[in-house]
């Protein structure tokens, strides 16, 4: 079973109240495991979702467990909670791991978060059977989705779209110099992505010196005096503009001079300010590539559409894996019946051999071995047809044949 709430079902205020910090995650997982009928448990808590997954003998009230973990009333969160069991729970876990249930489809962070939740539960003895197997399978399915589709290949955020375009222009970003003009949040995110992609030299300029220094510390960068930042343009490969200025801070004249000094090496200008910081005419210069926030938004929209197409293929993979996992789990359920049948027949065979041993007279070791092989072969042939039918019926959900075999061979209660 799975129960929880996410960005689709609950507002951020409620998700914040239910969020379970890493410092209490193990304790909360143990509390969930102590509920009657719960055999295994795992809790996943991120900024966009809080949910619990359990393997259980009965139907525990997971909504109440969620609410109690944060000191809330079950009735308060009830309208926002989704619940899945059996096949639907499998499908949900596989879709979460594959980032098909994320706010941004295809984002990679959720798989790492799920693996962390798995490890916490595993380290504290909360995973050891069916749920552990299902989660391990979910990780493999997520890997398959990543390798067989391009669901995570295209940028679907303004800041990452800037990086994608940078790569198209420069090929490699290794060693490229970035100037951040202004201190907007999107420019900070773009700079982070650029640095991770190989841009190593970060310069920062801002009308407020203290904010420039703060931003520079984030990237181990260098502060450039705002009044004279034009002088550094010949050094700049990528400029991110997000100043709050109400007029252009950069125009074609300054960039033309910089390009001449750069001997026509290209410059990439990202203007994500509103109103714009860079005169649009600047983009008409040779070897100057200027994109504003609308241009980047078009890239994002195009990539979101591409991801949706890839998501359709990912959904097909998930459905295929759900069916395969159901067969595996159902076959595992009847394993005790098969083992019990084989054990019972062996007891009968061994008992009859012992009963008849005195009537055989003295047997050579070879004769004794041949007789053992003969009787085992007869027993195995009798058991084979039953085992084949049990496994075949298990893939369809089990039922009459399994019950009949257990009853006829006195194997005890149905599992």
Image (cartoon, rainbow, N blue to C red):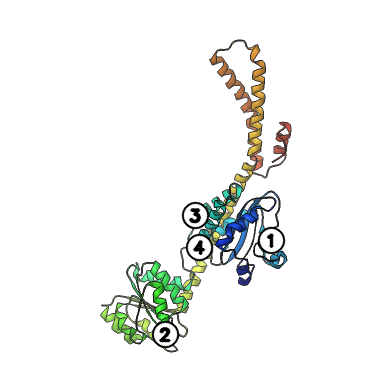
Separation (CA) of disc 4 from disc 3:
13 Å
Residue placed under numbered mark 4 in the picture: 109
The mark that comes first in sequence, 4 or 3, is 4
What element does badge 4 sit on? Answer: helix
Residue placed under numbered mark 2 in the picture: 208
Q: Would you say the residues marked 4 and 1 are in contact, meaning their CB atoms lie under 8 Å apart?
A: no
In the figure, residue 97 lies in which quadrant? bottom right
The mark that comes first in sequence, 4 or 1, is 1
The mark that comes first in sequence, 2 or 3, is 3
Indicate the position of residue 114 as horizontal and vertical percent values.
Answer: 54, 58
Residue placed under numbered mark 1 in the picture: 63
In the figure, residue 242 lies in which quadrant? bottom left
Marks 4, 2: nearer the viewer: 2
Indicate the position of residue 105 as horizontal and vertical percent values.
Answer: 53, 64
Q: Residues within 10 Å of mark 3 (few under 14, many from 20)?
A: some
Q: Depth check: give the residue in front, 324 or 189.
A: 189
Q: Depth check: give the residue in front, 248 or 169.
A: 248
The mark that comes first in sequence, 3 or 1, is 1
What element does badge 1 sit on? Answer: helix
Marks 2, 3: nearer the viewer: 2
Separation (CA) of disc 2 from disc 3:
46 Å
Q: Is residue 119 visible?
A: yes
Q: Would you say the residues marked 4 and 3 are in contact, meaning their CB atoms lie under 8 Å apart?
A: no
Q: Residues within 10 Å of mark 2 (few under 14, many from 20)?
A: few
Indicate the position of residue 365 as horizontal and vertical percent values.
Answer: 54, 15
Separation (CA) of disc 4 from disc 1:
26 Å
What element does badge 3 sit on? Answer: helix
Residue placed under numbered mark 3 in the picture: 143
Position of 42 relative to 364 (above/below): below
Separation (CA) of disc 1 from disc 2:
49 Å
The mark that comes first in sequence, 4 or 2, is 4
Separation (CA) of disc 3 from disc 1:
31 Å
């Amino acid at each position: 079973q799975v129960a929880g709430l996410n960005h689709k079902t609950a507002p951020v205020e409620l998700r914040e109240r239910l969020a379970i910090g890493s410092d209490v995650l193990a304790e909360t997982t143990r509390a969930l495991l102590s509920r009657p009928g719960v055999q295994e448990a795992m809790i996943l808590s991120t900024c966009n979702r809080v949910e619990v997954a359990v393997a259980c003998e009965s139907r525990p009230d997971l909504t109440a467990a969620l609410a109690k973990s944060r000191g809330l009333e079950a009735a308060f969160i009830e309208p926002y909670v989704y619940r899945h069991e059996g096949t639907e729970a499998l499908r949900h876990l596989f879709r979460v791991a594959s980032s098909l249930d994320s706010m941004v489809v295809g984002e990679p962070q959720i798989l790492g978060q799920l693996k962390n939740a798995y490890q916490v539960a595993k380290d504290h003895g909360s995973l050891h059977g069916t749920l552990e197997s299902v989660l391990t399978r979910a990780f493999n399915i997520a890997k398959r989705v990543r390798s067989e589709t391009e669901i995570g290949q295209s940028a679907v955020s303004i800041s990452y779209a800037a990086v994608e375009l940078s790569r198209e222009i420069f090929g490699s970003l290794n060693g490229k110099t970035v100037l951040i003009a202004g201190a907007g949040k999107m420019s900070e995110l773009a700079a982070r992505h650029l640095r991770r992609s190989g841009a190593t030299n970060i310069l920062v300029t801002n009308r407020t010196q203290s904010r420039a220094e703060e931003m520079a510390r984030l990237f181990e960068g260098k502060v450039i005096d705002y009044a004279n930042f034009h002088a550094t343009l010949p050094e700049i490969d990528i400029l991110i503009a997000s100043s709050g200025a109400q007029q252009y801070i950069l125009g074609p004249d300054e960039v033309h001079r910089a390009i001449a000094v750069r001997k026509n090496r290209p410059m990439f200008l990202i203007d994500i300010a509103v109103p714009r910081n860079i005169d649009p005419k600047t983009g008409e210069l040779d070897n100057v590539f200027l994109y504003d926030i609308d241009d980047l938004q078009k890239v994002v929209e195009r990539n979101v559409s591409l991801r949706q197409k890839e998501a359709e293929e990912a959904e097909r993979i998930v459905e295929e894996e759900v069916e395969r996992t159901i067969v595996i789990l159902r076959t595992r359920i009847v394993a005790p019946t098969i083992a019990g049948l084989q054990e019972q027949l062996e007891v009968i065979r061994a008992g009859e051999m012992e009963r008849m041993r005195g009537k055989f007279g003295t047997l050579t070791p070879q004769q004794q071995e041949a007789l053992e092989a003969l009787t085992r072969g007869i027993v195995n042939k009798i058991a084979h047809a039953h085992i084949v039918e049990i496994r075949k019926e298990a893939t369809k959900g089990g039922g009459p044949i399994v019950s009949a075999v257990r009853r006829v061979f006195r194997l005890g209660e149905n599992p």
